[in-house]
Image: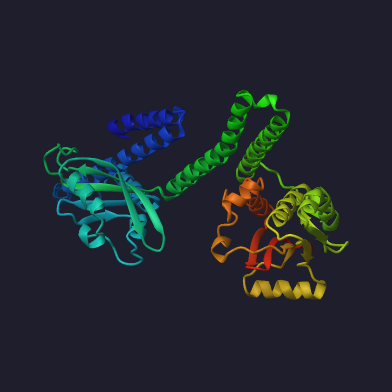
Amino acid sequence: MSKRNAYLLPAGVGAIAVVLLIPSVTARVAVAILLFVVAVVFLVRVLLTRSSTGKLQTARASSNPPDEEPSQEIFALGKLFEATMSGMREGLLVVDKDMRVVASNKAAHRLFNLSQGKLDSQRLTELTRNPAVYSAFLDALKGTERSGVKIETHGPERLVFDLRVVPLSSANGRAAVGRGAQGALGVFIDITRIERLEHVRQEFLSNVSHELRTPLTAILAFIETLEAGAIDDKEASHRFLSIIRRNATRMHDLIDDILELSAIEAGNVLVRAEPVELSPIVTDVISLLASKASAEGITLSNAVARDAVVFADARRLEQMLTNLVENGIKFNRPNGQVTIRFESGARDDEERRHDHETAASHSEAPGRDKIIVEDTGEGIPAQHLDRLFERFYRVDRARSRDMGGTGLGLAIVKHLALAHGGEVSVTSELGRGSVFTIELPATQ
């Protein structure tokens, strides 16, 4: 091991230790990315230095004995650089002072939508028309490091990258500011998922703030009215207190649903699936919602056979059915009906064997049990169906709030169905009602 490597090894270990000790996840990721870029720059500079001394090594080889081999250290360094380039998830692009690509990796090929061919020797303007990319590399060739450049691509899917470009110099390992560099190295870090999660987070916080602000404003307004003297009016005070209680209950339900949904999405809710009888669960749900259905003039029907068995967590299945039936009551017509039915995905032995053979030949999963909740409401417009199971999504916001909905019930149903290894879907026809279907792995 060379003396320089003897210093680099403890330095690298120390850098890793520093990264692990940083408490903030965001800061830790930023420092790790910076150290990674520094390491790649170091490797590229070393290889450029090695290539610039190629003629001198050739001359020495002619005067040295033919059996003299390059040092294992140089060989290992070249292999390490090659493995790093090909194994990186980040796109790596190295250009010379003429803006021609001299090195790239597979991730860069995917970034520029090149399924075949090489990026090498192509000019940067031939690869992309994005002015932000060209400007970042141009500044690096002038000796100015660029970082935090946001790049968006609009191919088959929208991708977002954080671009960092540093100047390269084979003379002294550093390009002075204001002087031309020998080349530039750019690292394209895919932050598409981070951007998407940040958008979801901001949208969630905005929705939660809005949903909590509405009942809280009503509570404060009626409290001020009571304090202003309305408390002495017995009839008015009772009415105001009833409204305050209703809004406080709505806030409580909203917070409970938020905590429940967060726990389900985080995987903290344990689903213990086992064969359970479906009809008694449906009967319990109908009994729980009977008074609410009666107040709206809605008839609840259990059309599930007594011997129907599903593979599910009984408590979580009851929670899913309660949310769906309650929605069916809220958005139904006067004197309407909500019916719960069951379609078994299991067959007799011969049919089941035939189903498995057919599924295997077509790469499909075996049949699933279907629990169907059907209402006779006004139906849901087609443009809303794809987003119906999103958090806080409502077809009619004002009507849903008036009925005390939190906007999270269907999202909870979706995530609980996924936790069972199943899914939930909806079909609807205007004027005829909606059909929600929970699909679960069929019992054998």
Q: Residue furthest front?
A: 233
Q: Is residue 162 visible?
A: yes
Quarter of the image for the N terminus: give it.
top left
Which residue does the image show at 60% across and 24% down from the upper left?
228
How many marks are shown on the rendered structure? 0
Horizontal side of 138 relative to 107 (left or right) equals left
Quarter of the image for the C terminus: give it.
bottom right
- In front: 360, or 156? 156
The colour scheme used to paint the residues is: rainbow
Residue 341 versus residue 222 in the image, above or below? below
Residue 327 versus residue 352 in the image, above or below? above
- Dividing the picture into quadrants, the one containing residue 233 is top right
Which residue does the image show at 55% across and 37% down from the upper left?
213
Q: Position of residue 21 (x, y in %)?
A: 45, 27
Horizontal side of 213 relative to 78 (left or right) equals right
Q: Position of residue 42 (x, y in %)?
A: 27, 40
Which residue does the image show at 37% across and 53% down from the upper left?
86
Q: Is residue 285 visible?
A: no
Q: Residue furthest left?
A: 179
Q: Position of residue 263 (x, y in %)?
A: 63, 41
- In front: 127, or 225? 225
Q: Position of residue 32 (x, y in %)?
A: 39, 37
